[in-house]
Image (cartoon, rainbow, N blue to C red):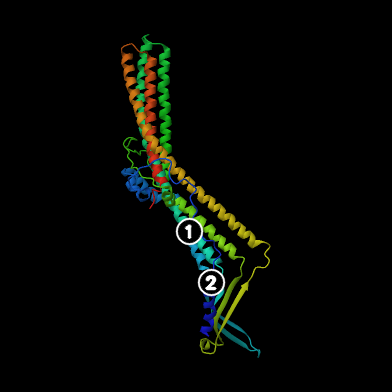
Amino acid sequence: MRVKLLTPLAAALLAAGCSMMPKYERPEPPVPASFPYASATEGTPATELHWERFFADPQLRRLLARALQNNRDLRVAVANIAQARAQYDIRDADRFPTVGATLSAQRAPNLQGEQATTLQANLGISSWEIDFFGRIASLSEAALAQYLGTVEGRNAAQMALVASVASTWLNLVADEELLALTRQTLGSRDESLRLMRMRFEAGASSELDVRLAQSLAESARVTLAQLQRQRANDLNALSLLVGEAVPVSFDAGNTTESVRLPDVPAGLPSDVLVRRPDVGEADQQLTAANANMGAARAAFFPRISLTAGIGTASSDLSGLFSSGSWGYTVAPSLLQPIFDAGRNRAGLASARAGRDIALAQYERAVQQAFRDVADALAGRATFAEQVAAQARVVEAEAARYRLVRLRYDNGIANQLDLLDAQRSLFAAQQALVQARLGRLQNQVQLYRSLGGGWE
C-alpha cells in the first residue's frame, strides 16, 4: 500500500521541473566604457575602504557609529529585509506539500437504529499543486530576488547615511569657521564705526563716512545671524541623521583646511557600477520581474493538484490502529484554463510591462550612478585649482587691505577705500571657506558614488 501511494508522488516529482521563465541576462550598461575625467591611479578602491579608514576624525567616527546604530531610516531598511525574507519563505513553502493530521469522533445512529461511535485518524496532503510548468518556482524565484533587493537597498541606505552624516558634519565645520571669521570682522567694523563717529564729532569726517561704516557693521551682523541660523539647522539635521539629540554646545573643533580625506581610484564603469548597492537593487528587481514573466506564462498551462491521505477508522479506541482498519486515498486533479475572459493574457501583458519598467529602472540606476561618479571626478579635477586660486585671492586682498590701511593712517587714502578693502577681504575669506568645503564634500561624494560606506 505504501508503494502504491509513493509511486504517483515520485512520478509527479520527476515530472516537475519545467520552467516558462525567460533566461535572465544582465543588460549591457547604457553608459560609456570609461569616465570622462581622470581619477587617482593608486589607493584602495572605495568598496574595499571601510568608512573608519576613510574618515580619520575621531569625532566624526563616533557620530557615524551612532548613526548606524540609531538611524530610523536604516532600521526601516533592516525591517524590510526581515519582511521580504518572510515573504520569500512563505512563497517557497508553496513548492512543498502541506501534510496535516486529523482525529475525529462521530456518534450517530447505525443501520439498526442504535447509537454508534466512529473514531477516525487521518494523515493527508490537501490540494498540493505539482509545479509541472514552474509557476510556483517562478513566484519563489521572484520573491527571492525581491528579498535580495531589500538587502541591496539596506546597503544603499547605509551608503547614503554615511555620506549624509559626513557632509552635514563638514557643514558644521564650515559654519563654525565662518562664524569665527564673521565675529572677527564684526569686531573690526564696530571699531571702525566707533572711530568714524569720533572723527565725525570732531569735524574730521562727514556723515556719509559714518553711514557707510554703519552699513558695513550691520551687514556683518546680518551675516552673523544667518550663519547662526544655518549652524542650528545643520545641527538639527545631524541630530536626525544620528538618531539622537546632538547638544547645542557641540563643537566640531576643526577647520575646512585641517580636515583631510584620502583620494580613491575610480576604475572602469563596468567594474564600479555593478558594485554599487543601488544598482544591485535595481538588478534584483529586474530579476524578479523576469521571474514573474515565467509565472504568467505558466498560468496558460494546466494546473495539476494532488490530494492524498491515509487513515484508519474504528468504533472503539483500542481498535483504531489495528490491522484491517487502515485505508488510503489518492486523488489527482488537472485544471486546464479554457475560458477566463482574457485574465491570463492580461496577466502576461502586465508581467511584460513590469519587466520593461524594471529594465528602464535598472538602466536609469546605471546612468545615475555613472553621472554621480562623473560629477565627482569633475569636481576632483577642478576643486584643487579653485581652492588654490581662491587662496591667492585672499592673500592678495589681505595685502591690499594692509596697504590701504597704511595709506589711510598716513592720510593718503580715504575712508571709502579702507572700507571697500575690508569688505573685499571678508568676501574672499568666506569664498575660500566655501571652496574648501566644496572640495571636501566632493571627496565624500566620490567615495559614495564609487560604492564606499557600507560593508
Query: Vertical placement of 320 versus 32: above or below?
Result: below
- Mark 1 sits on what residue? 147
| Residue type pointed to by label 1 | Tyr
In this rendering, the answer to whether 442 lies above or below 432 is: below
- SS for callout 1: helix
Q: Position of residue 292 (x, y in %)?
A: 55, 60
Residue at mark 2 to residue at mark 1: CA–CA distance: 25 Å
On screen, residue 335 versus residue 76, left or right, reads right
Q: Residue at (31%, 14%) from the top-left corner?
A: 409
In terms of sequence position, does the residue under pointer 2 or pointer 1 come before the other?
2
Which one is in front, 415 or 250? 415
Horizontally, residue 182 falls left or right of residue 20, namely left
Mark 2 crowdedness (10 Å alpha carbons): few <14, some 14-19, many ≥20: some
Res 192 quadrant in image? top left
| Residue 118, picture quadrant | bottom right
Describe the element under mark 2 as helix, strand or loop: loop
Indicate which disc residue 16 carries.
Answer: 2
Give the amino acid at mark 2: Ala
Residue appearing at x 54%, y 53% in the figure = 358
